[in-house]
Amino acid sequence: MPCRIAIDGPAGSGKTTVAKILANRLGIYYLDTGAMYRIIGLYLDEKGVENDSDIEKELSTIKLEFINGDFYLNGKRVGDEIRTPYAGICASKYAKKAIVRKFLTRIQQKISKNENIVVEGRDIGTVVIPDAEVKIFLVASTEERAKRRYKELLDKGVNVSYEEVLNEIILRDKQDTEREIAPLRQPDDAILIDSTKYTIEEVINKILEVVLERCKLKLQKE
Ligand SMILES: Nc1ncnc2c1ncn2[C@@H]1O[C@H](COP(=O)(O)OP(=O)(O)O)[C@@H](O)[C@H]1O
Ligand SMILES: Nc1ccn([C@H]2C[C@H](O)[C@@H](COP(=O)(O)OP(=O)(O)O)O2)c(=O)n1
């Protein structure tokens, strides 16, 4: 039986960081569904499409591949261009569209089917893998998340202000939780972890405790 670990939560709660380390330590796959929404969101924004029929037309021409942990859009490897605050806003905007969600959810379910995998996003435990063996809902205070994301972007040399990052997070939190389709919400059977006062290592250990108890996985690395 596969072990599928769903990690959902708002921007900056630590999903990507924790998911990558968990996958590495357990020697299993990792899927960043947010990156997929960022890729599609930026693409559709650049095309300037708004209505469903134009979006459908564009999606029918897109080839989105996931090869050895990297995404390729129409054959071109995707890089850090999707990590800007603007890309996050485009992702969140088009993530409200059922047609975009259907397109990406299908790919996500294909990638994660019958795999030992950590999948992170907003609707993994509710829509993408509702029967996941482990569901984590990872949160942190808005200020702590903005502080983390601000430091992360500065470390990457991205020229942003703290206010810009805070406002982007508040906007996306609102859009992601209030949208009609697949809103960000804690699955009833998810374990809530508030990482505000925990280090990355402490969060990982909390999740590993559950995973090693429920899944037949062994630590490949400490
Ligand atoms: N528990 C934590 N304590 C301090 N910093 C953290 C914690 N979890 C993540 N971070 C840092 O916060 C930033 C955003 O984390 P990330 O994993 O990208 O969040 P998400 O994927 O939920 O948006 C990263 O620089 C990461 O190193
Ligand atoms: N499974 C997902 C993943 C992301 N999204 C949307 C909503 C998010 O605001 C954007 C960007 O997601 P991403 O996980 O990259 O954002 P953070 O890393 O949490 O800041 O995409 C979604 O609707 N469903």
Image: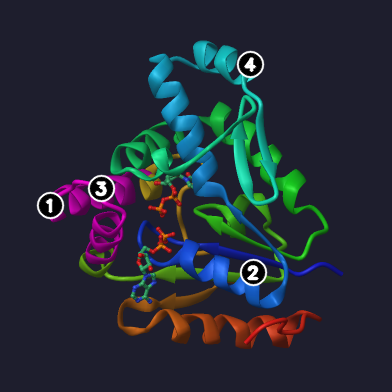
Q: Is mark 4 on a helix, strand or loop?
A: helix
Amino acid residing under circle 3: Val
Observer-side mark, 4 or 3, equals: 3
Circles 2 and 1 in contact, beta carbons < 8 Å = no
The quarter of the picture showing ligand 1: bottom left
Q: How crowded is mark 3: few (under 14 residues within 10 Å), some or many (20 or more)?
A: some
Circles 3 and 2 in contact, beta carbons < 8 Å = no
**What is the C-alpha distance between the residues marked 1 and 4?**
37 Å
Q: How crowded is mark 2: few (under 14 residues within 10 Å), some or many (20 or more)?
A: many
Left or right of 46? Residue 167 is left
Q: What element carries label 1?
A: helix
Residue 31: image x %, image y %?
62, 54
Circles 4 and 2 in contact, beta carbons < 8 Å = no
Compared with residue 15, is residue 202 higher up or lower down, i.e. above or below?
Answer: below
The disc placed on residue 61 is: 4
Q: Which of the pair 199/174 is nearer the observer? A: 199
Amino acid residing under circle 4: Thr
Residue 115: image x %, image y %?
79, 60
User: Which tag, 4 or 3, sits closer to the chain's start?
Assistant: 4
Q: Which colour scheme is used?
A: rainbow
Residue 60: image x %, image y %?
65, 17
The stretch in magenta equals: 146-175
**What is the C-alpha distance between the residues marked 1 and 3?**
14 Å
Left or right of 92? Residue 217 is right
Which residue bears the numbered disc 2?
A: 23
